[in-house]
Image (cartoon, rainbow, N blue to C red):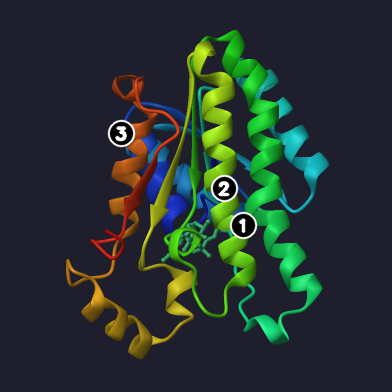
Amino acid sequence: MVTGASRGIGRSIATRLAADGHRVVLVARTADPLEALKGEIEAAGGSAVVSTCDLADGSAVNELIESVVSDEGRLDILVNNAGITRDGLMLRMSDEDFDVVLNVNLRSIFIACRAAARPMMRGRFGRMINISSVTGLIGNPGQANYAAAKAGIIGMTKTIAKEFASKGVTANVVAPGFIRTEMTEALGAGVLEEAAKRIPLKRLGEGDDIAHAVSFLASEGAGYVTGQVLTVDGGMVC
Ligand code: NAP
């Protein structure tokens, strides 16, 4: 299951996991782009189902995982990718903008991982992969809410890794740098060009750069890797 699968990084992850041979549950709020992606995956010989959910609603997240497990009979890989921004400098950031970002970017992941843990333990196999950000490691002016959520993902995932390791369930974080998606396009071409100059690998990342990392962490072969933060940022934080 991949959240935020309708565009950007989540779309690349879902496409990649389907190409790896997994049946993928595509999750976001809006059905049309998910249906279009399902069509593309099937045309390429893969398998996908669509499930709409607003991750801001905790009980909907619980119901989503329950329905995936009851419809599919199992849930092996959970990629918590969906995320939002409500940027603003600290002194001007409203309580509401803090809460909504924490709700969607952190609380929903807690609820999804908690709901997925039992079915994964029953199957003695699980891969929880949570998408954070370099902002969660180093902070960023104007993103106190986002940085708090993304740093929270890291501490929470390390805890999940320790709690479920003995049951064959791993939990890891991927922390992207600047990736070319609608989220970063909103920053404007000038900002992105300047950012690319400061990145040691001299380019912005693509969704596929993140998808490759997720594909590895989701694989059988990554069974001895847990509680890690894999930074995929062209060398920004090293
Ligand atoms: P994006 O292009 O804005 O896509 C966000 C995805 O999340 C969409 O599929 C969106 O679909 C879904 N979504 C948003 N709010 C949702 C909600 N309440 N419930 C369910 N789904 C929701 O974002 P992106 O750039 O691909 O980023 C993906 C993840 O990577 C995020 O967690 C982001 O913080 C992280 N990240 C991105 C970058 C970057 O440079 N792009 C860098 C570091 C980390 P709907 O609108 O239809 O719901």
Q: Tell whether 88 sits left or right of 138.
A: right
Residue under numbered circle 2 = 153
User: In the rendered structure, which amino acid carries the disc numbered 2?
Assistant: Ile
Kindly report the distance in space between the C-alpha atoms of the residues bearing marks 1 and 3. Answer: 24 Å
* x and y percentages locating residue 194 in the rendered image: 29, 85
At 72% across and 52% down in the image, what residue appears? 54
Which of discs 2 and 3 lies nearer the camera? The answer is 2
- The residue sitting at 68% across, 55% down in the picture is 104
Residue name at image x 69 percent, y 30 percent: 114
* Residue 127 vertical placement versus 129 (above, below): above
Q: How many marks?
A: 3
99 lies above or below 36: below
Q: Inspect the image, locate mark 1, and give the three-letter code of the amino acid beneath it.
A: Ala
- Marks 2 and 3: CB-CB under 8 Å? no
Cα–Cα gap, marks 2 and 3: 19 Å
**Where residue 106 sits: x, y (%)?**
65, 50
Q: Which tag, 2 or 3, sits closer to the chain's start? A: 2
Disc 3 Cβ-to-ligand 1 distance below 8 Å: no
Residue type at numbered disc 3: Phe
Instruction: Find residue 216 and name its label.
Output: 3
Q: Nearer the viewer, mark 1 or mark 3?
A: 1
Q: Are marks 1 and 2 in contact (CB under 8 Å)?
A: yes
Give the x, y percent position of residue 173.
45, 43
At x 34% / y 81%, what residue is drawn? 192
